[in-house]
Amino acid sequence: MILDPILDVFRGKAVTIPPLDGAFRPNTRLDDATVFAELSEPDNLLVSDGRLLVSSGNAILAVAAGSEPVVVETFQSPVTALALSPTGELTVGLESGKLLIAGKEVSLPAEIRCITALAYADDGTLWLANGSSEHAPSQWAADLMKKGASGSLWRCGPGGIGFQKIAGDIAFPYGLHPVGANVLVSESWRHQLVRFDGANGSRLTVLTHLPGYPARLAPADDGGAWLTLFAPRNRLIEFVLQETHYRQDMIDQVPPACWIAPALASNRSFLEPLQCGGIRTMGIRKPWSPSRSYGLVVRLDRTMQPQFSLHSRANGTRHGICSVAEQDGRLFVASKGGNCVLALDLASGGFRWN
Amino acid sequence: MNFRERLQAWRFNLVPDHLVGEILTKRWTDNAIPFLALVATLGVFGSIIPGFFKLTSLQESTRQLGEFSLVVIGVTVVMLGGGIDLSVGSIFALSCFSAVYVFFILEQSIWLALAAALCTGLVFGAINGYLVGYLRLRAFLTTLVTFIFGRALFDILVTTYAADVQLSQASSDVLDFIGDGTFWGLSVSVWLAIILAIVTHIALTRSRPGWHVLAVGGSRRSAHNAGIRVRRTVFMTYVFSGFCASIGGFLIACRLSGAGPGTGLNLEIMALTAAVVGGVSLGGGRGSVVKGLMGAIIVLTMTNGLIRLGYGTGTNQMVLGILLAVAVTIDIRWLKNRHKVLNEVYVAPVYLKMGETQSAAPGSGTSYELDNRLSAADHIGLGELEGPEDVILDRDDHLYCGTRHGEIVRFFAPDYRRSEVFAHIGGFPLGLAFDRDGNLISCVGAMGLYSVSPDREVKRLSAETTRSWTSIVDDARLRDPNDCDIAPDGRIYFTDSTKRYDAHDWALDSIENRATGRLLVYDPKDGSTKTLLDGYRYTNGVCMAHDGKSLFFAESWACRVHRYWLEGPKAGTAECVIRDMPGYPDNINRASDGNYWMAWLGMRTPSFDLSLRHPDMRKRMTRRLPQDEWLFPNINTGGVVKFNEKGGIVEALGDLSGNAHPMVTSMREHKGYLFVGGILNNRIGRYKIEGADPNWTSPASYWGAKA
């Protein structure tokens, strides 16, 4: 209506989110996929020497088909990021803010306290995403609900000469994908992918209006990339983000697990918030109902445009996907909210969105 | 409580925001805009023109108004029937000429002149009606053609006979009286307009042909499908319009004792403007005679006022045009957006600070602690049933429940595999109870209190109570009758949960949280219904205490259970026996061990409790988000809680998996089993209660062992 812009001043704009359409058209591929391994909150996946490594809590485990996961290494605090250097050194970021390369602690600038992603470029440069200067990685929800934008991007090397800050004021960088001398970063709270210039840190938005909160990026065999989105955008949450007083009271008085905030898994406790559309009716939870958690993996082509996606919808369980790894025509998907690692066959084809 | 919160509490609990929405649901709000326009017009012209309201001035204005109103009534009826009549001006003029010709030139009686005028109008109306109604030509073009044709004919006749009329010697007292006289202070034309308006109003609102006109205008196809003779109805509206215009024409012939080139000029534009400005919808089906009359007064006051202020015809036409444009725009925008406005303003949340509650989480160690026992219940009617809000068993162990299709379904003992529709009531049967004679009493959502006899005869017991003095919506009507129970003396105590929302929107009431729930009593002796208590936040389950001297009732959104005393020193008063529960209580029923079962339809969540202290946030939420996205209490997890006579919690059962019984709205103990129902569930659960009396039944507990 022609008067809407005037009326909006008084009544507020309708809160809208991008629809799941086009390359994001929903399917049930993640819920249909076979379980490769079951373990508690698998976070980061990494292929090393043909082995599949998974971080879960304080440990890194090796998982293989048909056998129980084997603990490779354990640490003092939870593992928050994994990477493998071109020379084969395992690089680990911890919840405590420490960074270990091949088991040795590397000194970091004091600003880095929230290592959310690590990635090596082909020349051995190590990229590091510092999600927030105020919160630890496990407190990501607080960073979002306080509208944090204090994340930063760091670079080391090649050759290990210490970390340089490339860019700051990023709203929770959560994924890294080096492309030549530049790096593609998923900026979670702004629902977008941004390319940072390796030389001067200037930024270029590559993909915006994502329907979820982007997490880690993983290279695909044909030069494209896999993008995981760890939680869906939700109109109620976006509304609460606009509500200063309610949001502040919620942060102060409500336990974080019961916040109106994105989650890796939902509907586990009756203390969690429920939206009208999520009411279980006649034994059914509608797959398209609003949800705080979702499972979504997106395939990006070489120009970083989405091609197709894999979903676990509101009534599914493979939610909270933070990391994937492609190996030998198979895609491994770590569902942190679903407590499992899935394996999907890419070679069998049929991986088009229609 | 900080200052901001206190301010919010005052603002949202003291300012009656909900009245805006309630007023908008009234059909008479459609009249409000034209009425305000009428008052404004009269006010403005009355104040700037000296002597506007003087008797002589009014007398002349009202004479003109009478004629004009007659024409507008005709146009209104055509528009209500979905058509439009542009030819009223020329019919008016031709009728005027017919009367003048018969009286002055043929020198016949005034009654013959009237007959001639009426004939002219009816013939032209019939031509319009035949072309539009039977041949189904476009109303706009057809009446445009008759308008041009009629006007041309009138111009020819007037120029031919003008001189003859001037020279005529004919005169009549009747004609003078009609033209100039008054009867009880009002001129004949005004009297005629008033009579015709009343007759037409009654015909439109209270008679079959009138309803047919409105039905045809509202939806031609539906009217046809309903068996209405659409073509004839349309035909008759044009004939009526021609008839009205011809009376107007006759009156002006009497008043002016002649016909001139200006007679009826631009009358069609004025009549059309009047009808639309009054609020008669151009689309048909919506409007009334009163609206047309309001429009007539507005238009005539404006045009006369402007003339008296010295503005010429051009300005007058311009103002009419603008008036028409504005009215059409408002008509269309209002029609299209009224329900949107209503949706946006209807939910008017209030402030509530819920009390601290004990946790019901597994492992919390409180008496409310929920477990997973109900998920082990057997299922009855899985996939066949939809929405068994309440369940009940009779003396022969048969199981009854309501469904969302308005039926009461009976499952046969002993295995409850076979079922039949016991009775069809309609609405949404909710709470159930058996009376002494084995009649099944049911609170039917959106309908009222009903009784089904053992031989399936459905009888309405009550659908209304007394209306409160300050209500805007009709709160005498039972909107959401929820649960009932029967006292030993046969009186039926039942709850009506909310005055603000219909039964199927019950969950929306939790967002608003306004205290409008009632406890009522129906007396079978005289068939009367009385309101006992009012102002609770969603009154729900009712259960007679074991001794029959008091009853328990649940107040859902406040998470409380109250006891209402029927006799004793506290008779007629209620006291709260359980407060600040972690779940929202629903139905309450007797247990075999002298305690009571209470269903929890959902659980409190910290985020929703907090939102109750932020009514502004909830209001914005209802405006900016679609309903599916609104924050609700967690009604995906419920449970069954047993409490004792004093309100102490004995135990709690739940289905934390949420697979079998996510929301529990009722439960009924029978011979050692607990039967569990849920308003949004597709099954009834049967759960074996450990240690329960295997012979105890509810009918025996209420009415004694079988005679």
Image (tube, helix red, strand yellow):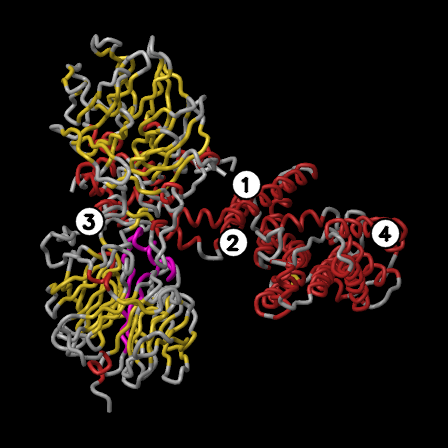
Task: Tell me if mark 3 has few (under 14), some (14-19) or many (20+) residues whose alpha carbon lies within 10 angstroms of its own.
Answer: some
Location of residue B577 in the rendering, given as x and y in whole percent from the top left corner: 14, 64
Location of residue A285 in the rendering, given as x and y in whole percent from the top left corner: 35, 52
Task: Tell me if mark 2 has few (under 14), some (14-19) or many (20+) residues whose alpha carbon lies within 10 angstroms of its own.
Answer: some
Residue located beneath label 2 in the image: B31
Type of amino acid under label 3: Lys
Res A261 seen here: no
Residue located beneath label 4 in the image: B153
For discs 2 and 1, the disc positioned in front in the rendered view = 2
Q: Which chain does the numbered disc 2 sit on?
A: B
Relative side of B539 to B199, left or right: left
Residue beneath the point at 75% across and 66% down: B174
Q: Quadrant of the C terminus of chain B?
A: bottom left
Cα distance, mark 1 to mark 3? 55 Å
Q: Which chain does the numbered disc 4 sit on?
A: B
Front residue (pair B159, B552): B552
Cα distance, mark 4 to mark 2? 39 Å
Type of amino acid under label 1: Ile
Residue B73, quarter of picture: bottom right
Type of amino acid under label 2: Asn
Task: Tell me if mark 4 has few (under 14), some (14-19) or many (20+) residues whose alpha carbon lies within 10 angstroms of its own.
Answer: some
